[in-house]
Image (tube, grey):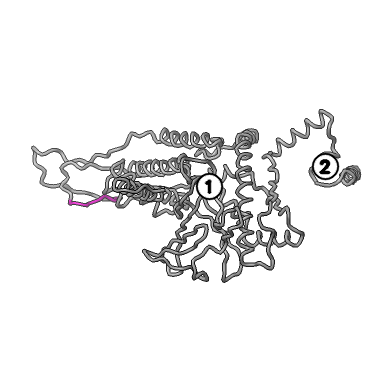
Amino acid sequence: MLLTGNIFSELNKAFTTALKKSEIHRLAIHEEFAAFYNNDYETICSYLREATLNNPFSEETLKDLRFRHINIIKKIINRITSGIFTKDPVIKHVEAEKSQQDLLTELLTECRFVQKIKEAFRKAVYFNTVEANVIWDHEMQRIRIDIVTPNNYTVETGGDYLEKSVIAVRKADKAGEIYWSVWSETGHYLVKGDAIIPPENNSEMVNPYYNPASKSSSLPFAALRIEEGEDYFGEPNWNIFLHQKNLDIRLTDLNETELKTLHQIYLGINTNFTAGESFKAGDFKQINNVKDDDKEPKIESIISNADYGAVRDNIDWHNKLVLSSEAIGGNSASTEVTAESGAAKKIDELELFERREEYKTTLHHFMAELLRVITMVWNCYNPKQALPADGKFDVRFTEADMFETIDDKRKRYDMAINFGYKDTIDIAAEELEVSEDEAKEIIRVRKERSNAEA
């Protein structure tokens, strides 16, 4: 509740203004995060120019400078998120009949449910909090899922700062005009400029999913949050973001310095050359009218003494440091092109295993909530084919196989034979994915063929 009175009115006004400024600042930060995540090169260059102005590049240098940008964000994120969705998870509605379960499976396939979960997961590892917006497409008469990142939405929270009561999503219409789609528990409207307008097929601007009898939220959104913070959004992954930004600056600086060293910088002394005059192969430059007391005309080459090998090693070291902080083996993004042993890869997987198990719990709750929202939206527009409302969903992940090289597998089988708990028939059945009898027959046929050839 807001306080009243002259003094309290001013305090409330100042507090509201501070909140607005804070939200604008948050959106600006997430805009920069989004530019690097989406690999928007031109926007990335604008942020890098701002960051490197006079540190180390002058304004004149920045006019023609093309930044070196190598996207490592996706590499790191894919490494962190891999191994969970090796196969599609098994999803069942506990209270649904067979026909309803078949309908749910069809809906999830049509809206690309698993692909959207993967997209949300990758973005959440970077942004920390993303929203899955379930939309009923009136033209196509089907459900669509949009994954919205924090640079494109803002929220109002109630008593629990982790639960949204109002959410506004930034969108663009067919003409490219930006507007905000605002959802509350009971209402839904659009904001274009200063005008509030009703959405298509909703002249009364009501939330079509509002059900006073339901204890669940009527907002068609499900939030995926990796870690809780001090506000609704928490902190994005500064570790990856700042590393990407610093890497681009370091690579650009290294590239510019190497190019200037390769082509050299020349210093002319008493040459009397015209402004902008340059050299090319086979040129002969004549300098006349040199007096005895003049300095001798000469051209000197300025060569940098930078240790480029050390600079590259330093960049590589930073790469490995950031990867290590994300529980990833440093060799996953080393600038050195070296082979990694099967044992090292297995160690990398073990380091990530516990973290992946935690992610599975987070994703399980997110998927269950998103399934509830999908059911809510579907039932609103398809009452004759309604799915059981407020039902429970069973979501099961398939187990991921650890990476194993051929050499590792051979050693494992040799060990099993030496210890006596497997023989060649067991190994053939496992490798060929056949029954024990079929494995025996395959081995028998191969032996007969070998004996006949001998």
Q: Which of label 2 and label 1 is nearer to you?
A: 1
User: Pointer 2 and pointer 1: residues touching (CB < 8 Å)?
Assistant: no
The tag on residue 428 is 2
Is 278 a magenta residue? yes
Is residue 261 toward the left or the right of residue 221 in the image?
left
Q: What residue type is labelled 2?
A: Ala
Quadrant housing residue 246: top left
Task: Locate the C terminus and report the quarter of the image it occupies.
Answer: top right
Q: Give the range drawn in magenta.
A: 274-282
Q: Residues within 10 Å of mark 2 (few under 14, many from 20)?
A: some
Outermost residue toward the front in this view: 5
Residue 253 image offset from top left, x and y in percent: 36, 42
Residue at the spot 15% in from the left edge and 42% down from the top edge: 270
Is residue 6 rendered magenta in the image? no
On the image, the x and y values in percent for residue 282 come to 29, 50
Residue 41, percent from left and from top: 42, 53
- Describe residue 69's horizontal placement relative to residue 282 as left or right: right
Query: Marks 2 and 1, how far apart in space?
Result: 43 Å
Label drawn at residue 124: 1
- Horizontal placement of 398 versus 331: left or right? right
Q: Regarding mark 2 in the picture, which secondary structure is present there? A: helix
